[in-house]
Image: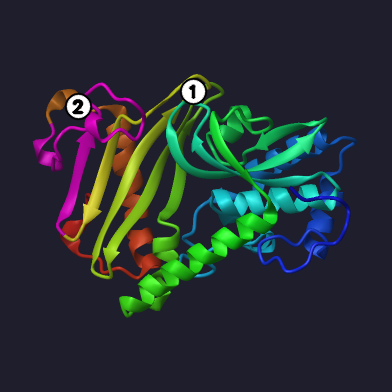
Amino acid sequence: MSGNGKEITDFSYIHPYSDGIRELVEKLGADSAEGFLKKLLAWFDENIAYSRLDSPFYPLQRSDLDLLNMRCGTCGDFSNLIVSCLTAIGVPAGYAFVKTDCYGDPQDHICAAALIGGRRVLVDATLPYRKWFGYDCPHRETELVSPEEFERRLRATEAEYRAIAEDWGKPEYAGLIYAPWIHDEIVRQTEDCIETVFYLLSMSGPCDWELSATYMAYTQERGRTPVMGAVSGGGTCYRFSVREKASIWDPEQWSEPLTEERIPPELLSPEFELLKADMKKNVPRILRAAGLKEERDTLPDR
């Protein structure tokens, strides 16, 4: 980990001694690292969205300053800002690659890690974790890496996806295949539950894509995914979680794909209606932002 008070150089993802980071640190203030981080997580609530729709192609990995300017990004971008702020206040900090999260679900996720009071503390600004577990998040399986190692790995990954996009003859698509988790939107929230629609754009070629929209409902104790939609050049279909599952991502839980007119009445839940309404709003936005062709029969309820 880093954060020994010495200036860090040759990083493109964190800039702990920049004016922007200094101003944020001074604005938040706190008399302890824990107090500062809790204020920073509350600042995320009011200022940062989970989305890449403003600029899905570039930059691939957003830096701390990119996040400050754009006010939106994804988990790795959030972690860059947290690590940068921690380094700026002299707290040793790095990253955690999360393989199994605090709910016991497998994940491909990143959060920040800090050395506070002689122990490692995970700091996660991504929902739903931020709502209940942002400070000292109890993720179950993680790999801790230094800022130097994180930079090395992510630069290599960026280069890998640039090469794939260039082979497709669509170099601008590098950002889409590097970060397919393109948008997440809260559709309902109470003190005890947060429900979002999470959009993932899968591409195996410039004209071969599928946009999935997964309805995700979380309490402090558990998460569930009752329904998902999928949009491709062939149209829109829905799947419902109808079988016992090992995790929220277990593919065995889903029904066969159903067009809306084939959905049995017992599956027409409030969650399905919320999903459908959110897709009607966001699918056209995502396809336009990604530069993918819109066809009338691709979109729900046009």
From the top left corner, tell me how far across and down residue 218 is, in percent. Answer: 46, 27
Give the residue number, with chain letter if any, for mark 1. 219
Q: Residue furthest left?
A: 262
Q: Quadrant of residue 153?
A: bottom right
**Apparent side of residue 252 relative to residue 173 in the rendered image (left or right):** left
- Choose between 60 and 274: the one closer to the eye: 60
From the top left corner, tell me how far across and down residue 162 is, in percent. Answer: 44, 72
**Apparent side of residue 49 relative to residue 288 in the rendered image (left or right):** right
Here the colouring is: rainbow
Instruction: Name the image quarter holding the C terminus.
Output: bottom left
**Apparent side of residue 210 relative to residue 163 in the rendered image (left or right):** left
The magenta segment: 234-263
- Secondary structure, mark 1, is loop
Disc 1 packing (10 Å; few <14; some 14–19; many ≥20): some
Give the residue number, with chain letter if any, for mark 2. 267
Q: Is residue 291 above or below residue 268?
A: below
**Apparent side of residue 287 relative to residue 255 in the rendered image (left or right):** right
Q: Tell me the residue at 79%/45% (across/down).
A: 92
From the top left corner, tell me how far across and down residue 19 is, in percent. Answer: 83, 64
Going from the N terminus, do you reach mark 1 or mark 2 first?
1
Identify residue type, mark 1.
Thr
- Choose between 117 and 23: the one closer to the eye: 117
From the top left corner, tell me how far across and down residue 136 is, in percent. Answer: 68, 30
Q: Quadrant of residue 296?
A: bottom left
Q: Tell me the residue at 22%/50% (across/down).
A: 301
Q: Tell me the residue at 52%/65% (across/down).
A: 156
Label 2 near label 1: C-beta < 8 Å?
Answer: no
The reply to whether the magenta stretch includes residue 209 is: no
